[in-house]
Image: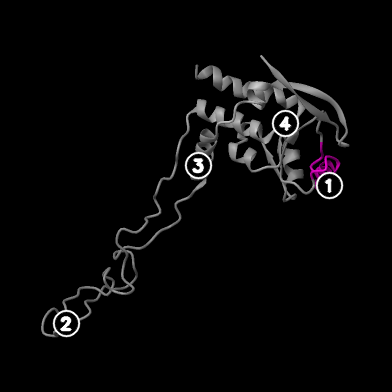
Amino acid sequence: MESIKLNVYNLKGEKTSTVSVSKDIFAHEVNNQVMFDAVTTYMANRRQATAKTKTRAEVSGGGKKPWRQKGTGRARAGSTRSPIWVGGGNVFGPKGEQNFKLRQNKKAHTLAIKSALSSLGKEHIYVLDELKVNGQTKEMSELLKALKLENKKVTLVRDDSLVLRASRNLPNLINRFIGNLSVYDILNTEALIFVKEDLKGFENSINKVKEETK
């Protein structure tokens, strides 16, 4: 399998070595359509059906007949909450039960991940030789400064609760677990950070989907 080299840095921001990664994953031919589909699916699945209107049965009041049926010269009316009245119920409005969920098959989603990584470019992918923190925001802030990323949108891929805690208060830094990294996250960042020991697991998770869909 062909490979490409990614630079490896220490916590001081110094380049220490390089690491070989799959060219099929990090330098794949970019497919804009599958990336568009992946982002559309991601955004739709985050959407919640919060819009809700009340029908004439749900609007408060209107139980009393406004006037008698005959003899007034006015049109007959049975309730002040009829949909044709101001303040009445709504007909065919949203019920708060809409399902906006979409689905993208595994093979297409994997291709979208590869396309997103490849479009980001290896020069914007940073690999750390190690990352051990105590959960302090200062540690992550110093790391970003060392890598000269303090003013960029950064996504850090790491399955570590202490790293997650240390990342929370930095507005330009998002922490994602390996299995939760989305196409949207990759396209919406200016720099992507991996830890060297996690790269093989990340590549295996991509290749596993490829094997399952053969």
Give x and y (percent) for residue 64.
24, 76
The scheme the figure's colours follow is: one colour
Mark 1 residue crowding within 10 angstroms, few (<14) / some (14–19) / many (20+): some
Q: Earlier in the sequence, mark 3 or mark 4?
A: 3
Q: CA distance from mark 3 to mark 2?
A: 52 Å
Q: Earlier in the sequence, mark 4 or mark 1?
A: 4
Q: Earlier in the sequence, mark 3 or mark 2?
A: 3
Q: CA distance from mark 4 to mark 1?
A: 27 Å
Name the mark on residue 74.
2
Q: Earlier in the sequence, mark 1 or mark 2?
A: 2
Front disc: 4 or 2: 4
Identify the residue at image location x=66%, y=23%.
203
Front disc: 3 or 4: 4
Where, quadrant-wise, is the N terminus in this rendering?
Answer: top right
Residue placed under numbered mark 1 in the picture: 138
Q: Earlier in the sequence, mark 4 or mark 2?
A: 2
Q: Which stretch appears magenta?
A: 133-149
Give x and y (percent) for residue 30.
59, 30
Residue placed under numbered mark 4 in the picture: 122
**Secondary element type, mark 3:** helix
